[in-house]
């Protein structure tokens, strides 16, 4: 297979792979003190210096890989910071001082929940200081939810998150995010220190954005305003239960998680705007990154949004610095940066889904689509000088369809595995649905973002116009999805026969894609990942 998408290099991958293995190993041996692994990693640096690359490249590579593996184990141990003694303790009453890190959307108006760092614990629970915890507590009458960075005091029951929680449980979600404790069945007592001015401004901007995205449509079509707000602000509580079920069954719930789809559209829109304003490259990078981060922050700074932001900034920095950047190198660099800062993210569903999908798109989807475009020529025997505009338009449309189909089939590989592993759903029709719906969603996101820009600039009539444009697209999306889920066999309840089977299949799939990409997908090997998925579905999945 020959393709302009092949041949891209990502040197950091040789550091990332052993580091990933180390983080995974660290989870298996998380009772070992981090200092021991840090010492081992430091000692492994010596052979790296001794076996210089030019003198003994094999030993140099082995020593470097060992160093990164041990560094991964040590970094996981540093961030997990579990207290082993608490694994056998029952829930304890406690009064804690918390620094709020994230607030979840309110399901009950009288309660608030989120993630926090325990700043202080009354004796004899002082060892809890510095630990991350999930909290779900009743609010005082008339009090609102605390904002990020606020310091609050609370009383309730604190207990450790199980070391090996049940698959698919909320405890597993907490453990995969590096949280060691739950603080529940209590109440918030007082806000001891208000949130910082920046986060108060973010909260105001979020409320303002919520109002802007409903302008002109909230009274006429409130269900479409809810979809637009959920899509642009990741506020899934604006969706009704029936809407959530339909989007889940169609495999399109990813539209409402701020991720690469949203960040990519917004980044391109900002760059186009800055180009019209004739800003220099450095200004585009700095202003664009700041604006993009502000959007990420007002939508809650979810892990998927932060990861997409990192990848976009790496790509734009390579362009500004005039370095030979490519999407694969940017993907690897952003994954490395994210996992250095928060290694526990490796075990979250959002990390695995987002990076696996983008990796397979770059490694398989683009080359596959380009191969089909080279193979399927409508007028190959007709000289170019004899081709009319009708011939060229027909070939252009076919190329677009084939390119999109290649991307869609690559995405379907990962979506099939992760859908079964994380949502216990197999959606065979999601490929066809996403091929049609993703381009429509891109238009809706673009219209929504332009509406936000106009509204924040005081141009409310323009916001109303773009809200109506977005609502028109969303009405079409809602109708198409409603028709799709009624098709027999569009989705099936399914689960892997063993909890570890999903991770094993995903790793094998990615390994096959990396190997095939390195070999330029010669000799028809592009179908290897599809064969792996077929075998996994036959022997490792239980339907119904």
Image (spheres, rainbow, N blue to C red):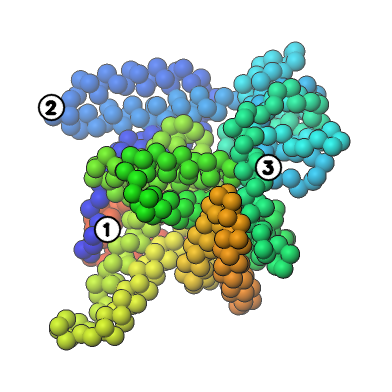
Q: What percent of the width, then of the height, locates residue 479? A: 62, 74
Determine whether the residue tagged by mark 3 lies in a helix, strand or loop: loop
Looking at the image, the residue that sits furthest to the top is 123
The answer for how far apart the CA atoms under marks 2 and 1 are is 34 Å
Please report the residue visible at 25 percent of the width from the left and 75 percent of the height from the top: 375
Looking at the image, the residue that sits furthest to the left is 55
Which image quarter is the N terminus in?
A: bottom left
Q: Which label belongs to residue 5?
A: 1
Q: Quadrant of residue 385?
A: bottom left
Asked whether, in this view, residue 181 is left or right of residue 407, the answer is right
Q: What percent of the width, then of the height, locates residue 513? A: 34, 55
Q: Which label belongs to residue 55?
A: 2
Q: Residues within 10 Å of mark 2 (few under 14, many from 20)?
A: few
Q: Are marks 3 and 2 in contact (CB under 8 Å)?
A: no
Please report the residue visible at 62 percent of the width from the left and 50 percent of the height from the top: 209
The answer to whether residue 373 is visible is: yes
Looking at the image, the residue that sits furthest to the right is 141
Q: Are marks 2 and 1 in contact (CB under 8 Å)?
A: no
Name the N-terminal-most of marks 1 and 3. Answer: 1
Q: Residues within 10 Å of mark 1 (few under 14, many from 20)?
A: some
Determine whether the residue tagged by mark 1 lies in a helix, strand or loop: loop
Please report the residue visible at 19 percent of the width from the left and 24 percent of the height from the top: 51
Q: Residues within 10 Å of mark 3 (few under 14, many from 20)?
A: some
Q: Quadrant of residue 380?
A: bottom left
Q: Which residue is mark 3?
A: 104
Asked whether, in this view, residue 298 is left or right of residue 434, the answer is right
The answer for how far apart the CA atoms under marks 3 and 2 are is 55 Å
Q: Which label belongs to residue 253?
A: none
Q: Are marks 1 and 3 in contact (CB under 8 Å)?
A: no
């Amino acid at each position: 297979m020959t393709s302009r998408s092949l041949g891209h290099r990502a040197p950091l991958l040789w550091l990332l792979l052993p580091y990933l293995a180390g983080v995974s190993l660290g989870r298996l041996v998380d009772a070992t003190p981090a200092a021991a692994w840090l010492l081992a990693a430091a000692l492994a640096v010596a052979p790296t210096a001794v076996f210089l690359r030019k003198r003994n490249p094999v030993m140099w590579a082995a020593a470097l890989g060992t160093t990164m593996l041990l560094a991964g184990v040590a970094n996981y141990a540093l961030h997990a910071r579990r207290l082993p003694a608490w694994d056998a303790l029952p829930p304890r009453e406690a009064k804690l001082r918390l620094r709020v890190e994230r607030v979840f959307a309110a399901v009950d108006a009288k309660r608030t929940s989120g993630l926090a760092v325990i700043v202080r614990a009354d004796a004899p629970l002082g060892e809890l200081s510095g630990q991350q915890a999930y909290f779900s507590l009743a609010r005082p009458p008339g009090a609102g939810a605390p904002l990020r960075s606020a310091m609050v005091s609370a009383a309730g029951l604190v207990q450790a998150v199980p070391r090996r929680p049940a698959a698919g449980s909320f405890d597993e979600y907490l453990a995969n995010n590096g949280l060691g404790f739950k603080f529940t069945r209590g109440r918030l007592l007082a806000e001891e220190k208000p949130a910082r001015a920046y986060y108060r401004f973010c909260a105001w901007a979020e409320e303002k954005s919520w109002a802007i995205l409903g302008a002109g449509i909230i009274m006429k079509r409130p269900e479409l305003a809810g979809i637009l707000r959920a899509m642009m602000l990741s506020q899934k509580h604006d969706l009704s239960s029936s809407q959530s079920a339909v989007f889940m069954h169609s495999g399109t719930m990813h539209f409402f998680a701020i991720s690469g789809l949203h960040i990519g559209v917004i980044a391109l829109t900002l760059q186009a705007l800055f180009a019209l304003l004739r800003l220099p490259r450095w200004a585009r990078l700095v202003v664009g990154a700041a604006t993009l981060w502000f959007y990420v922050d007002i939508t809650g700074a979810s892990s998927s949004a932060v990861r997409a932001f990192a990848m976009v900034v790496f790509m734009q920095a390579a362009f500004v610095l005039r370095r030979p950047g490519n999407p694969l190198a940017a993907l690897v660099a952003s994954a490395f940066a994210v996992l250095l800062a928060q290694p526990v993210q490796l075990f979250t569903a959002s990390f695995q889904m987002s990076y696996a999908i983008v990796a397979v798109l770059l490694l398989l989807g683009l080359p596959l689509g380009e191969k089909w475009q080279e193979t399927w020529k409508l007028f190959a025997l007709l000289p170019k000088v004899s081709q009319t505009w009708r011939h060229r338009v027909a070939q252009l449309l076919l190329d677009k369809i084939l390119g999109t189909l290649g991307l869609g089939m690559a995405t379907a590989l990962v979506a099939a595995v992760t859908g079964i592993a994380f949502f216990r759903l197999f959606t065979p029709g999601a490929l066809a649905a996403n091929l049609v719906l993703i381009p429509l969603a891109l238009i809706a996101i673009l219209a929504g973002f332009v509406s936000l820009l106009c509204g924040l600039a005081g141009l409310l009539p323009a916001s109303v116009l773009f809200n109506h444009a977005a609502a028109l697209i969303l009405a079409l999306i809602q109708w198409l999805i409603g028709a799709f889920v009624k098709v027999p066999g569009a989705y099936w309840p399914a689960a892997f026969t063993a909890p570890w089977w999903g991770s094993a299949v995903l790793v094998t799939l990615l390994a096959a894609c990396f190997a095939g990409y390195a070999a330029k997908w010669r000799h028809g090997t592009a179908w290897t990942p599809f064969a792996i998925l077929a075998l996994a579905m036959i022997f490792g999945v239980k339907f119904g």
